[in-house]
Structures are given as C-alpha cells and as structure tokens.
Amino acid sequence: MDHRFDVTERFAQGAQFIAGSLRSGTSGRSQEVVDPATGETVYRYELAGTADVDAAVEAAGRAFPEWAGATPGERSDTLHRFAAALAEDAADLAFAESLNCGKPIKLSNEFDVPGSIDNAAFFAGAARHLEGKAAGEYSADHTSVIRREPLGVVGSIAPWNYPLQMAAWKVLPAIAAGNTIVLKPAEITPLTSLLFAQAAQRAGLPDGVLNIVSGAGRDAGEHLVGHRTVAMTSFTGSTAVGKRVAEIATGTVKRLHLELGGKAPFVVFDDADLEAAVHGAVAGALINTGQDCTAATRAYVQRPLYDAFVSGVADLMATVRLGDPFDPATDLGPLISHTQRDRVAAFVDRARDYATVVTGGAAPQGELAKGAYYLPTLIAGAAQDSEVVQSEIFGPVLVVLPFGSDDEGIALANDTPYGLAASAWSRDVYRTGRATREIKAGCVWVNDHIPIISEMPHGGAKASGFGKDMSAYSFEEYTQVKHVMYDNTAVARKDWHRTIFGDRT
C-alpha cells in the first residue's frame, strides 16, 4: 500500500533548505514539479537565486569548524542516527521519488530507498576509518605522519534520474569526512533531496552541515560551482554540462569530481548462457526506463547467438508492463518528462532510415498517452558509427550488433567516447578475464549488469569523467592528504644545510 502525502503542504515554506530551515527562493522565478505519469503539476516553488546560494554557502562555512572538529566517532554516531531516520521515512521517500520521477513504486521501494539507507549505514562506519600510510621513519632523522583532513564547503550538483540516491552519494561521503555541503538537486526533482535533509536534521546533524538549494543550473548551479568559498565541486550529469562545470571550477582551482554520461556495452560471447544474457539485457536496458548512465545500451552478440538473442530480447520486452507507477504490478514507468520522451522518440525515428526497429519504437496510446511513456525498444542493423550506437539516448532503447572474433567484440565495446560501465557474458573465465582487463570502463560486470553496492566504487573513465562515488575510495575525493614530518634529532646545524650555506663541519 503506497504512502501518499500532500506535497504542497509538506513543503509550504519553500524548496530551499538552508541552515536547518525550509525557505522560499529569491530568484523571482517559479518552477513546477510535474508528475510525468499524468503531466499534472504536483508542486510549484520559487527557484533559488544567487543570493540563496550565497546564504547556503555561508551557513555551510559557519558550520564547518565545529563539524570538522568532531571526532570520527561523533560523526559516525550522527550518521547511524541518520540511517535510522531514513528508514523511518522509507514510505515517504518512495512515494516522493515515484511521484517526482515516474519510476515504478517497486523500484523505489526495493532499490532507490534501501540503497540510500544502506549508503548512510555504510558511511556511518566508514567515518571511523579514514586510513593513511603508517607513521614511520621514512627518512632516518624524521617521523612522517599522514593526516586526512576535510576540504571545507563542498558544492555538489545532482541529476534528475536518481534524486534520492544521488543526494546520498554526494552528501554522505562529504559529511562523513568532516566537510559541510551545499547540494543543488535538479530543479525538476527536488522533493526527495528535501526529505533527505529533513531526516538528517532529525538525526541531529548540526544546522548548516547540509543545505539544499533548488535552482536552475545556469544561475544557481554555476554560481555554486564558481563560488570562492566552495572548496570542491562534485557533479553528476551529462558530459556536455560536465565540461562547462570544469571550465567554471578551473577559475577558482577547486577540487573536482565528475560522473558523466555513459553508453554501456553488453558483450555476449558465443558460449554465454543465452537465457541469462537475454534477461540481463532487458533488465539492464530498462532499469529506471533506461534513464541510467550505466544502463545496457549497446549489445554486442557473437554471431552464433545473435539471431536467438534478438528474438529473445524482443519477446521478453513485449511482456514488460507499462502503467501507473503506484501499481505494484507496473514494470516500466514514464520518462522524466514529455520533452525527454520526445527526445528519445526522435533518436528512434531517425534510426529508421538506417536500421530496423525490431520492437517498440512508439509511445503507447489510450490512458497512458497523457504521460511521458515510451515502449521498450530494440533496434538492430545499425552501423557502429551511427547515432544510436554512439550517442547517449537515455531511454528504454537497446541497440544490438553482431561481432565475429573476440578481438572485434572488445574493440567495438571500446569504440565510443564513454567509459562508465560494461558487462561481459561468457562461461569461460579466460574470456571474461580478458574482457575485464581490456574493456575501458570504471566498472565491468561479469554475467550480470547493473548491481551496485555501497562497499564498492562507482565512477568512470574517458568522457564519463573521473573520481568515485560510494565506498571508502570516495574519501579520496572529499579529503585532503597532508604530510606532517617531525624532526627527531634535536640538532640545530643539520648536515643538509651545507647545500644551502657554509661548509661541512
């Protein structure tokens, strides 16, 4: 049974969370939050302007000394309470995520929400394990110590496809390491970020440690990235916008973490379990209606299995149930907006000139026509250099191509600008071992595609960006490594001084 609440009533004070309080934005412009399943507006709020960003950064700056000075154990205790508060709010979080994004409630309940709670629990433990090189005498006359220190105020920007999980991925490692943060969610999906911040406040996170500014990228986002008080920017989004973020961040020489676009290859060798590969391809391509930067988008299938794979995927896609996101039986919800639906449809329509749309390739009619729905779509016969193979579509579309030799399959997998995720399907450990070594991606799954866990890092290579979310590796992004060196000799005139002045005594 879903858990609904009145969004307008819940966020009547506004969609900015600054210094522990909800408030209205000051940009002078309003933003509608739309249910993509119906096209109806469920909330309207005033967007954040540059003054709101300044206020949030100032609040984070004030909170930083005390939070950075807390012991790892104290920060850990707060994060444990935060995980518990999120668990208490699980039903609200799932409702808001499905309402705002259109994702099926079973995905929100079984993936987005528990994953975010688990992230909080993981970083509660990780807060006490900021490891560094052992103290020791690496120089005969000195003792060296490595300190990991928080950077200061972090300014992060999250996308619209996984608002709750992206809030968790940005906020949790940052605050676990002792930083304070200003998070800008996508202006069309602010709801779960605000609930996330309110849960943190209930858990005892000091005011100002976590702030939310709900504003547009070109003013609030760019101002946040370029803010001189902000020590680091973490951005998840498209590669094109990531380049703009990098340009702005360079102006103040701040730490930068970018998790950008993807075009994940799904490589099926001729000894693979065909049934497993077919099921994995459909699940990997359709998760979150394909609006996932790690989604399976390019299936390369060795020729002996190619025809059976195409047939199997088409048949399985035809069984996927589109419908009301709050119906537990619904498999596939709408895309985030009609604009995004039309963008996906345009990719598919252009592909008809050079490829075959095996199944799907249309928006459903009837009751679903008012929402931003699009049928699961399989395209075959496209060339490697075609648009649907090379460009990120971000919808429920899988393109399948055949390959001959193993060399060719791996070469094709690497033949896009992106390098975020990939999978290899085979019963042969040597084949999969080679694929994991030679496919250029931040994550390579073997005989599966999509699973993520809090203990392991997420991040890409090539045009998919750099840096890691989740796991202890994320602390590399959110801490400054400092070397402290102690003299052990108590000698005033050291032998090395003669290289600067005087003679050897």
Image (cartoon, rainbow, N blue to C red):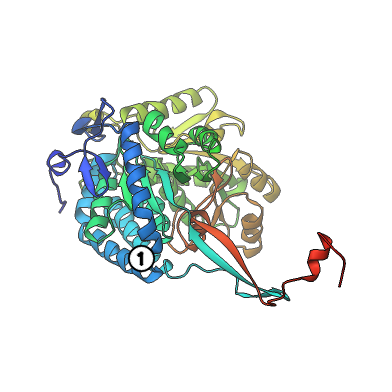
Q: Residue at x 55, y 29 (%)?
A: 387
Residue matched to label 1: 75
Q: Residue at x 34, y 37 (%)?
A: 53
Image quadrant occupied by the N terminus:
bottom left
Q: In this view, does 427 lie above or below 56?
A: below
Residue 273, given in percent of the width and then of the height, sits at 52, 58
Which image quadrant is residue 120 in? Answer: bottom left
Q: Which residue is drawn at 20% across and 55% down?
A: 91
Q: In this view, does 140 lie above or below 18?
A: below
Q: In this view, does 356 lie above or below 1?
A: above
SS under mark 1:
helix
For residue 139, say whether it is visible. yes
Which image quadrant is residue 118 in? Answer: bottom left
* Mark 1 Cα-neighbour bin, 10 Å: few <14, some 14–19, many ≥20: many
Residue 258, given in percent of the width and then of the height, sits at 51, 44
Q: Which residue is drawn at 57% across and 61% down?
A: 482
For residue 166, say whether it is visible. no
Q: Which amino acid does label 1 sit on?
A: Arg
Q: In this view, does 503 lie above or below 291?
A: below
